[in-house]
Amino acid sequence: MERGPRLAWAAVGFGLAGLLSSWSPVAAPFGLAVGLASAGIAVRALVAGARRRVAVTGLALAIAAVALSGAVLARTAGLGRDRRGTALVAPPPAGQSAAALDGAAASGREARERAARELDAFQGPAPRAPSDRGGAQGDAAPSAAAPPASR
């Protein structure tokens, strides 16, 4: 069996697969890749002298898949959108984010310190991370504590 007709039908199949997977922002990169591959297969089929109508159909499907995938990816990236409208989610006021983060850090500080004390009691003091105030806690180098002996 000749290779040309099989390439033409493969181009149609891949072109259709690329076109079907180009509608979603999640699948559009796959539609783009499959469309490009299908275009290459269609060109090879045309050069090999396959059924011209089938190969051109595969090429047209591939071009449509690449164009549609590119358009979906461009719209997903924000090209062509009007940015002057109101935001869907209103940004918080200037100091509210910092205050919320500081409150969350303060509420969890006691639990972190209690967990560190329990860990120190279990396996000995461990090197500490820099404190919340931006400085290091102590100037001593971390000690190489021996792992607990197994029995």
Image (spheres, helix red, strand yellow):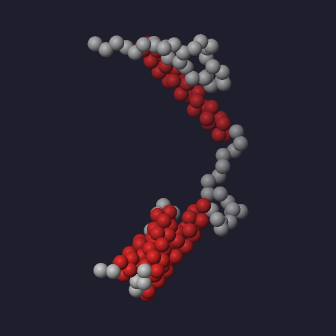
What's the residue at 40%, 83% (across, down)? 50
Q: Residue 3's image quarter?
A: bottom left
| Residue at horizontal 57 percent and vertical 23 percent from the top | 129
Q: Is residue 46 left or right of residue 90?
A: left
146 or 55: nearer the viewer: 55
In the depicted view, which residue is nearer to us: 56 or 49?
Answer: 49
Q: Quadrant of the N terminus?
A: bottom left
Q: Position of residue 16 (x, y in %)?
A: 42, 75
x, y percent for residue 17: 41, 71
The one nearer the camera, 146 or 23, is: 146
Image quadrant holding the C terminus, namely: top left
Res 94 → quadrant: top right
**Image side of residue 70 versus residue 95, left or right:** left
Q: In this picture, is 4 found above or below 144?
A: below
Residue at the location (69% across, 62% down)? 83
In the displayed structure, would residue 54 be above or below residue 67?
Answer: below
Residue found 48% across the figure and 77% down from its top: 43
Whether residue 61 is visible to the viewer of this picture, yes or no, is: no
